[in-house]
Amino acid sequence: MSSPYAIEVRGLCKSFRRRVIRGGVTTFKTQLVGLLTGKRREKFEWRTAEVLKELQLQVPAGATVGIIGRNGSGKSTLLKILTGIYSPTSGTAVVRGRVSALLELGAGFHPEFSGRENVLINGVILGLSRSEVRDRLDEIIDFAELRDVIDEPVRTYSSGMYMRLAFSVATLVDPDVLIIDEILSVGDEHFSRKSRNKMEEFKARGKTMLLVTHDLATVERWCDSAVWLEGGRIAAQGDPREVVAAYRKVIAEQEAQSAPQVPAPPLGLEVSGLRVLDGGGQPRAVFGPDDGLVAEVDLESHRELPGAQLRAEIVRHDGLVVYGAATPLESPPALGVARLRVDRLALNDGEYSLTVAVAPAEGAASPALRGVFSVRSNAPAAGVVRLPCRWEIVVRPPAPAPVAASPHVAQAGT
Amino acid sequence: MIRNLRELYQYRALLWSLTSRELGARYRGSVLGFLWTFLNPALLMAVYAVVFSVYMRQRLEHYTLFMFVGLLPWVWFSSSIAGGASTLSDRRDLLTKVRFPPQVLPAHVVLTNGINFLLSLPLMFVLSLASGVVPTWHVVVVPVLVAIQTAFTLALIYFISALNVTFRDLQHIVSNLLTLAFFLTPILYPLDVIPEQYRTMAVYANPMAAIATSYQRVVYEHRLPDPGPLAFCAALSVVLLLAASAYFSSRREELAELV
């Protein structure tokens, strides 16, 4: 019986018992005093941490699945259970086929040994036979581009070289299921592209891949589906763009809440309340690239503030400032509303935040108000903006007499 | 528990790789390199020879040879136990980052030291010849002794290394117990120095005594070993090894989490 799923996880729970030391730092003196007086200052306590709670997950064979989530959400623990390093507390985790896990590059490298010797032993640790490793030794060395230094001890390698060697060994194992923990960006630009190509190749050959990464763009671009882990549970799973968007939104909202509120001296001119609206004045969170957007802020003015400005900024989730401008605000009303009207957003898909603040001619601005919105389109394109452009195809009439071999030469002759 | 040992055989390539790396790493970077494998026991022998045949003169004929015959297997045993106690707790990188059969780690310590032991055997025979003692056919028993000692040492290391993961004091306790065991084992002195009433206990309660005296019988006295203690020691080693494998298997799942 064969199952369409390469990975099947049912009701998976994992908890760890950890010993915590309370009561300060252990030194020789505290230990000695503790032993002599019979009182141990530090108290040991067993604490149970539930890392994974009732997890259900099915990965079809040949799929590439990205796992995202914050630190401590259980991503690595899940990978370690699937790899077989940890065993589940309850529930089952079945992986069909030969598994190779890249949880840490260079695990088991010995600094005193040459690159070549380390490749041999590391390959065996990863489950190959010695002759298999020997057969592919040249391939590995060439892929890592370390032919010149392969016989020097790895302690003399730069960290980039070390990682390259480790990555080359790890991908040499030809698994059915490849489990990767945050290592796609290995080495310099050139090698990182190379390693990506290697991954593409795995994908093209129908291997199942499971990767944990904080590089959300990779998940969007690369994965067939995404799983968002939050506190040991699956918060969302499915289409990578949707899952990533939901994750980004939560992160952005939390950041907005926890942003340090620096008490600024009152300017006498304040913005209070920011609303993100559509062209028709209705509150909205998701826009199309051709939609209009209106940012509406409430203004309160208590005194004259010469040279005051309204500052608006649109920032993409990755920190890229898409738009930023300061507009002079002359004679503001005592109580009023200011609207920033964008006729057409012309932005590509992504999560954006919009901040508005007032600033005097000199000195600090008022605390910025922040709103979030996302852009979704039916036909996503690369890049940041959607320039208002289109293709024009013009049919050229056939040339009257094809005399010259090359049209270029023919043109030059006329 | 049989599964544990069968897997060990399955992973023999890994076991061998780790062992050969360990052997290579030990003297890596030193000028004399692999020569130290022979030089170390030779120098150790010289130290004991000077002390016990010049300062503390023994009435035994060819005392240096006698002492050396017992000392070599002891060095194998004690360095395996001392090094093996922390073999799991020291290799966090392997246990938690790779799917790795943990029983390979204790086994490779025994194997590494065992190979060092085998490599030092020629030295023993050279010494024997130099003392004018020609080895007899009795040396055919040596492989049996090696097998028994391997089983016994492996069993102890399985217990100790698995326990040491949660109780790290063990490695320090063990290294002190080894010193005690060294003097309780008839290596520097012949068995008949021990008072009559303790002698039986000394060889039955201490498997290393049974093994060391057997080596002495075979190589130094040219007699077959005393079958009683040796058979008991062999049976005990097998039972211990099975128990230790079972214990190791039962803890295997949690080793990666606790280490």
Image (spheres, rainbow, N blue to C red):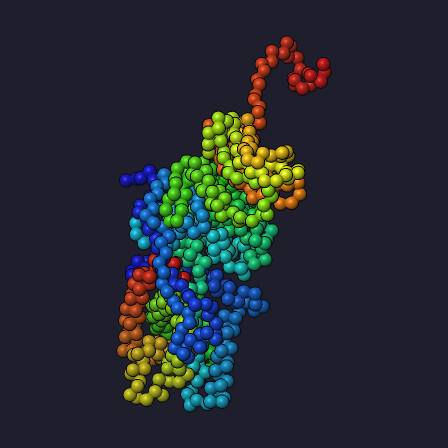
Q: Residue at x 62, y 37 (%)?
A: A309
What is the total number of numbered labels drawn onto the structure image?
0
Where in the figure is residue A18, as x and y percent of width and height?
Answer: 38, 61
Most foreground residue, A411 or A381:
A381
The furthest residue to the right: A413
Q: Residue at x 46, y 72 (%)?
A: B120
Q: Is residue A175 visible?
A: no
Most foreground residue, B210 or A411:
A411
Q: Is residue A397 visible?
A: yes
Where in the figure is residue A381, as x and y percent of width and height?
Answer: 52, 30
The furthest residue to the top: A400
Relative horizontal placement of residue B206, taking residue A250 as reference (left or right): left
The picture quadrant where one finds residue B182 is bottom left
Most foreground residue, B91 or A308:
A308
Name the quadrant of the N terminus of chain A.
top left
Figure check: B255 above or below B79 = above
Figure check: B49 above or below A265 = below
Where in the figure is residue A369, as x and y percent of width and height?
Answer: 53, 40
Q: Residue at x 46, y 40 (%)?
A: A249
Relative horizontal placement of residue B228, taking residue A292 as reference (left or right): left
Name the quadrant of the C terminus of chain A.
top right
Figure check: A390 above or below A110 = above
Where in the figure is residue A6, as x and y percent of width and height?
Answer: 35, 42
Q: Residue at x 40, y 79 (%)?
A: A37
